[in-house]
Image (tube, rainbow, N blue to C red):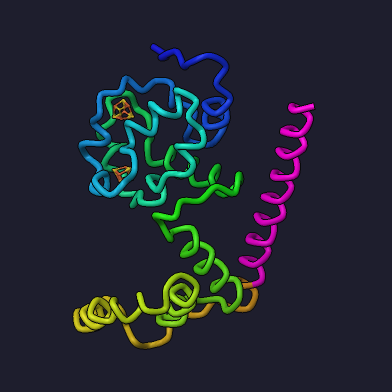
């Protein structure tokens, strides 16, 4: 049974066309995903609400929310969904769409963290234990690093953050990894241009 969406909803078509978004119209709004989500109380909208809003065509509200960026990819919603939907993938699809449409939320810094993470590995071939977070905090809030020093010390104390340097990618592996990231960036730009053209032609 597929639930009907409201009117000519381009947003839901966009989500459905993305990997993992195909089953969004099977949602029966039971709320099991929201009840299972460990981060739902920090999200602007719970996973169930996001799906309902997407089906109502509320593109701007959905993409400018912090919800998908707070998804931990724990898959609790996915293993419990009675309709075989993968809300985790829907969250990822919404992250992609928000990036693609240059929509951001002031209530999350996750997109910056993603960028810093991939740029760091792209540049040096490994994640420097402190360098990566240092770069991140410099961009978002240098004083935030000070606040998190007790967390870092606790991680060190419990052996969850070794002080030895992380293993570096071999030069050939690094070249391959850089090629993958560069290709992804080029494809992303190509997609943006294509969508911009579609948008402009739709308005004329
Ligand atoms: S658990 Fe599945 S069917 Fe229920 S609201 Fe969430 S996505 Fe929809
Ligand atoms: S995968 Fe994401 S949306 Fe699903 S329960 Fe975990 S944190 Fe919540």
- Is residue 186 found left or right of 151 in the rendered image? right
- Quadrant where the C terminus is found in the figure: top right
Q: Is residue 79 above or below residue 108?
A: above
Q: In percent of the image, x 24 and y 46: which residue is there?
A: 41
Q: Position of residue 168 (x, y in %)?
A: 51, 80
Residue 54 quadrant: top left
Q: Nearer the viewer, residue 167 or 124?
A: 124
Residue 172 quadrant: bottom right
Q: Position of residue 86 (x, y in %)?
A: 38, 35
Q: Nearer the viewer, residue 87 or 193?
A: 193
- Is residue 15 found left or right of 133 in the rendered image? right
Q: Quadrant of ligand 1?
A: top left
Total count of labels: 0
* Residue at the bottom extreme of this rendering: 164
Instruction: Determine the main secondary structure of the stretch shown in magenta.
Output: helix
Is 176 included in the stretch rendered in magenta?
Answer: yes
Is 140 included in the stretch rendered in magenta?
Answer: no
- Magenta stretch? 175-204
């Amino acid at each position: 049974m597929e639930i009907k969406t409201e009117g000519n909803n381009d947003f839901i078509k966009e989500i459905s066309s993305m990997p993992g978004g195909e089953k969004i119209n099977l949602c029966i709004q039971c709320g099991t995903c929201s009840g299972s989500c460990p981060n739902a109380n920090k999200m602007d909208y719970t996973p169930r609400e996001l799906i309902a809003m997407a089906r109502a065509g509320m593109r701007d509200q959905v993409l400018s929310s912090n919800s998908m960026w707070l998804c931990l990819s724990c898959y609790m919603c996915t293993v419990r969904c009675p309709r075989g939907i993968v809300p985790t993938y829907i969250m990822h699809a919404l992250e992609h769409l928000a990036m693609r449409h240059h929509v951001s939320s002031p209530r999350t810094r996750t997109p910056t963290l993603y960028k810093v993470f991939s740029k760091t590995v792209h540049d040096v071939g490994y994640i420097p234990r402190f360098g990566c977070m240092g770069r991140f905090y410099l961009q978002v809030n240098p004083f935030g690093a000070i606040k998190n020093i007790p967390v870092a010390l606790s991680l060190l104390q419990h052996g969850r953050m070794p002080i030895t340097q992380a293993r570096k990618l071999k030069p050939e592996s690094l070249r391959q990894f850089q090629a993958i990231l560069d290709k992804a960036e080029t494809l992303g730009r190509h997609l943006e241009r294509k969508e911009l053209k579609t948008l402009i032609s739709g308005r004329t």
